[in-house]
Amino acid sequence: MKENVKDRVLKWGWVVLPIYLFTFLPLHAGSVKSPNGNIELKFSVDSKGRPVYEMTYKGKAVIKPSHLGLELARDKHASKGLKETDLMDGFTITDETTAEHDETWRPVWGETATIRNHYVEYVATLLQQTERRTMRLRFRVYDDGIGLRYEFPQQKELNYFLIREERTEFAMAGDHTAWWLPGDYDTQEQETQQSRLSEIRGRFHEAVNWDNSSVATFSPTGVQTSLQMKSDDGLYINIHEAACTDYATMHLELVDAETKALTTKLMGSSNAYTPSPAAVAAATATVAATAPSVGYAAALPQPFTFVSHLTPDATGLKGAMQTPCQTPWRTVMVSDDARDMLSSNLILNLNEPCALDDVSWIHPTKYCGVWWEMIVGKSSWNYTDEFPSIYLDQIDWSRAKPNGRHAANNEKVRRYIDFAAKNGLDQVLVEGWNVGWEDWANMWKRDVFDFVTPYPDFDIKALNDYAHSKGVKLLMHHETSSSTQNYERHMEQAFQLMNKYGYDAVKTGYVGDIIPRGDHHYSQSMNNHYLHVVKEAARHHIMVNAHEATRPTGLCRTYPNLVGNESARGTEYEAFGGSRPDHTCILPFTRLQGGPMDYTPGIFVTRLKEWSDNTSWARITLAGSLALYVTMYSPLQMAADLPEHYERFDDAFQFIRDVACDWDDSRYLEAEPADYITVARKAKGTDNWFVGGKCDEQGHTAVVKLDFLDKGRQYDCTVYADAKDAHYETNPQAYTITKKTVKAGQTLKVKEAPGGGFAMSLIAR
Amino acid sequence: MKENVKDRVLKWGWVVLPIYLFTFLPLHAGSVKSPNGNIELKFSVDSKGRPVYEMTYKGKAVIKPSHLGLELARDKHASKGLKETDLMDGFTITDETTAEHDETWRPVWGETATIRNHYVEYVATLLQQTERRTMRLRFRVYDDGIGLRYEFPQQKELNYFLIREERTEFAMAGDHTAWWLPGDYDTQEQETQQSRLSEIRGRFHEAVNWDNSSVATFSPTGVQTSLQMKSDDGLYINIHEAACTDYATMHLELVDAETKALTTKLMGSSNAYTPSPAAVAAATATVAATAPSVGYAAALPQPFTFVSHLTPDATGLKGAMQTPCQTPWRTVMVSDDARDMLSSNLILNLNEPCALDDVSWIHPTKYCGVWWEMIVGKSSWNYTDEFPSIYLDQIDWSRAKPNGRHAANNEKVRRYIDFAAKNGLDQVLVEGWNVGWEDWANMWKRDVFDFVTPYPDFDIKALNDYAHSKGVKLLMHHETSSSTQNYERHMEQAFQLMNKYGYDAVKTGYVGDIIPRGDHHYSQSMNNHYLHVVKEAARHHIMVNAHEATRPTGLCRTYPNLVGNESARGTEYEAFGGSRPDHTCILPFTRLQGGPMDYTPGIFVTRLKEWSDNTSWARITLAGSLALYVTMYSPLQMAADLPEHYERFDDAFQFIRDVACDWDDSRYLEAEPADYITVARKAKGTDNWFVGGKCDEQGHTAVVKLDFLDKGRQYDCTVYADAKDAHYETNPQAYTITKKTVKAGQTLKVKEAPGGGFAMSLIAR
């Protein structure tokens, strides 16, 4: 049972400033404004009984009138109480409540020491008379956006239902510029596209990296969230979701003229559950399906309207629900200042408070690891090339013939431990330590790894002992190869092994196709799996950093041991052909909205062919790579390059040694999507600040007003900047390090090279 | 790694009589005879390179020339080594070996103390030249049938493959009479049909109980194995499979003229993997799909040909394989004496020896239980009717309002413990002891049970203590409601709970649709799951009795803690409308071929309305119900009726008290499918025999020749027989108990009433 707020406050001392202002405000039914009045939300039910909402910001339309509802699926068990009549129309409003809520809470880790959660809440209770079913729509209106969700109270006529599709509309007010990723059931690791909404369809095919073996697109106007947009009149608008637990991840499908035509053709089909061709094609994932959803879309009132599209399970269904329950929050953030998109805490605020009793074992972590040289292709995860295929229990690993390229060996790991100890890094990730890498991905192999058996050249006890003797921990790696059934079977033993040897963090991986076959990375069941892992890890006091898992929706507030996720195109792609220089100027607006990313920055030697056969190169300057430790907020930060590369540039590496990864305050100084981001952060429990600025391929001159420093105090300032002739392609390693003394009120201008950036430390005297 | 046979003999002392006669016999390549010469198997490769086999018994055709092969599925990961070229044709024979093998082994429990495994083995190694792939076909030819399987050695060009369909043909020599069940991916709980092969299509629709919510048929000529047939010239033929591990359960599809026509239409389609309409329809399981398999069927050479049809996964695929591997054995048993069908050990012999080091904790078990009154509807599994739906962690069970009908309460369980103790029963099953039964089935609810939390009126510690104080154990119940993900998550804790309280056996249940959604009860992944449970249970010294699981294929030899399965229409159907009186004269020929059934016999009060509102009635006489303890071999036997009903007929219940459930010897005296079965068994470690005779609705006079008794010795014989006027419908409780002294050489004639039978104990003086 959910505890009430008071209990939580008593239980968790770190919720320090609770202020409750539950007030029933007098206002027109169905219209509610944010605390400062900038945002207005209107809600009504139209002539067909369909719920409709709209949203303005300072009087400008953000969401034009848009429908809300869910199409349900008929099931063979209809007689058992599984309802199939849609929750789309026939509703009347039976009750409305409005209340203002204001509290401040303290995250276990974060960009700021405290977070204010201040909103006006509007709840409409709807009755579908014909079915005698009740549904609630809950809106929370913040000064920087709204959250809305569907709630399904426990009731006689609605105990269980199957979701055919959620039909939440977002009718945009114009042909905005959008930064979008192709909608996909299994991968988020694509390059962000920048285009008008009307250009999505035309750009879609080229936007997909079809070489990615996980690609499972569903519509040529399907895009992922978080979706960042900018209107011609200067509004920044972002659509995402918050608190997605045991529900399928939402995509957005833009309903343009072509989609409407197809949809109209499909109208009139019953809503009996039959997997659509799209669902089948998606399930087999061999090609991108192009069939649209069926149903109510033809009645869409607006151009440039997105409609929600959930990730299906193996049968094409979008969800199995039991009341009482609710959808995740659907979020729309808006501001006329791009910096507000980055400083917003709307998504964290919409998540539940911390569910863990004890959080003392959770800590921000800086780490290096045996990883990059494998990504680049210079060494291997697998120990042997001797066997055509592997049955884990049938190999005598001690007699297997080493391939001579195995990276996770005792000698190398000790080298990394020494490097971490010397440079104040907390942990050393080691990938490829455990048996099974010989044939681990895309074979539909269930029993891929056991997560407990090291290769013969990895002495798990000795290496952990050695690390601990130097004040360093090893960071565990569990690649599941998406065989989730196998992982769940071994997880308890795997976590026990971690506890035994003193690991307190695990990087998990979900490369390849999901087993059980037919399921998708972002389905309801997989979202349940990821959270199950986080909860089980918490029981063992283990922090989780999940790669290739679903995109985060702020669950790290509730489960702060979820310290990181990948869920986007990370640094590894610099070894796979590279990412555009503006990539890291987009991610904070999109991917990072839901939670921190383990981006694994810090590549100093960007031309990989300098030390390997890999001809790819990182599209970033060395100074720019330092900036990422500040601009890409995460409590988990990797120094991803090789120790010898850092030793070559030890003066620059000083910034990585110094920079914090947990903060008392953060100030976004400058921001424009895909152009530049400049942010200043105050290191937790200190008076020191760190500033990072990152720009796109155009370069940028950052203007850093030192307003945030304590007045009258002097600071030792070190600036790591691109040299004058630096360039991400032609001269990435040209940087300058300048030291000076500064104080509040001063303004520093720092020039960023194309694809470059800067980093700055401000140490209080 | 498989240990060699010698190691096994040393390891398991109970393998007492190993005789190895590996001899390379001189015979024509591709033709091999059974040890006594009755069965001849021929194998060749036809002009297209397709493997073909045929089989005769005493010169009569059993299997006419039939193809062997597998269609493979193309996968998007073809480039990763997943092969898609079929394993159907283009083969040449590169090697043939023949050897005779004779050993005798001792089962942990069984119908006989020792089992002879005597066969001639023929192995053909086949090369598919174009793909440079090798496949082996292994045949074992016994005097009472054959086993054949495909083997895929580990090799460069065949490491992983996906099975689109296995195409093993069984061309029958005539329009045999068959006892068949509708082929179904999810249920075996149908009434057996008796018809000519040519009549299957016409009978199919009426053969299916469409009210069973699990029905997922796939073809109007699809039938299940074990399939018992009888030819017009008096041959009894049975097709089944042995040692089905990590492979989909096989069905048989009869390719008649109509199927051929449809198949021909579908020919020419590529074998690229796309879920067929049949697979999709099966996945949604709303209707029986009628589309046939595609591919090679049109080339079938024979009428009355069955072709294998595997159970698909959620995507329609039939299997994901990694070499080295093999299919289960496909078995054809044959004799001109029906009794040989029942005494055959062919399926056990084709399974691997015991895989458990310690089997001391495995024991035959006679039990009663809190069960029948719930099946009948007089009481309930659930504790409360208070909640529309249940979240396990949100109910305060101690405050929930009892519905007053909850059967698994302390008082009632103590009553059953007392009854068991008084009557020498070993265990007491209690269903409905654990929370979650309020909304447990067919809701697509994942987190249904936790398997560790008792209802408030079930004091798990006190009841186990009480039972143990009386020399009785409780028998655990784990209904999974087919939410296998949930069961696997809780299984370790559930087994630990059992260990803590002294349970050593669990009845598992798989009612309802499989979660993960889209999967089927008999798929590769589910077969893996069932065996996973058995293996994990063995680690905890727990015996398993799995209901609604896949039909057994002799795995109880390898894992003798798998002491029972349901996997057919059990006694519970006597409360759901009843089963035909001949049902129990068919099951030993079909369902029991693969392993024992927890049929739960012993209903003395057949008219349920005598004590409940249920108007159904059991189609059996009381004496017939006693017979089942002998005719339906199982090491696990339930006395299923209520204690008070047994107390009413205590003189008859004496047989249940006396009868053994483990045997040193078994002699099938009379048998005809669906007509009658008479069998004598010698109780393990004693000189006592028990005889059972069961007949159909026609009645039968059993002739029991006491040849099997020790010569010259006297036996106290008690015969529990139908009274003269007994009848399963009109007078089921009319029985006589006769005592006499008998000796070897005598012949007893016992009249069995319509739907009746008899039981006999022969206690050596």
Image (cartoon, coloured by chain):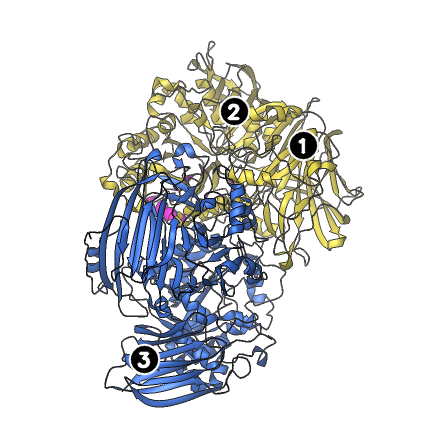
Chain colours: A yellow, B blue
| Extreme-top residue of the structure | A725
Q: Residues within 10 Å of mark 1 (few under 14, many from 20)?
A: many
The image quadrant of residue B654 is: bottom left
Question: Hey, which quadrant is residue A668 in on the image?
Answer: top right
Locate residue A745: give its quadrant. top right
Task: Give the vertical position of A699 relative to B469 (above or below).
Answer: above
Pointer 3 residue = B689
Mark nearest the camera among 3 and 1 is 3
Question: Picture coordinates of residue A744 (x, y %)?
Answer: 55, 21
Mark number, residue A584: 2
Q: In this view, does A523 lie above or below B543?
A: above
Separation of residues labelled 3 and 2 (CA atoms): 82 Å
Pick the quarter of the image with the C terminus of chain B.
bottom left
| Sequence-first disc among 1 and 2 | 1
Q: Can residue B275 be seen in this view?
A: no
Chain identity of mark 2: A
Q: Distance between the residues labelled 3 and 1?
A: 77 Å
Q: What residue type is labelled 3?
A: Trp
- Identify the amino acid type marked 2: Thr
Element under label 2?
helix
Q: Which of the two residues, B110 or B356, is positioned nearer the viewer here?
A: B110
Mark 2: give few (<14), some (14-19) or many (20+) Cα within 10 Å: many
Q: Residue A442 carries which label?
A: none
Image side of residue A119 versus residue A382, left or right: right
| Mark 1 to mark 2 CA distance (whole Å) | 32 Å
Could you say whether the residue bearing mark 3 is in a helix, strand or loop?
strand
Chain of the residue where label 3 is placed in the rendered structure: B
Disc number for residue A259: 1
Choose between A372 and A687: the one closer to the eye: A372
Q: Which region of the structure is painted magenta?
A: A491-520
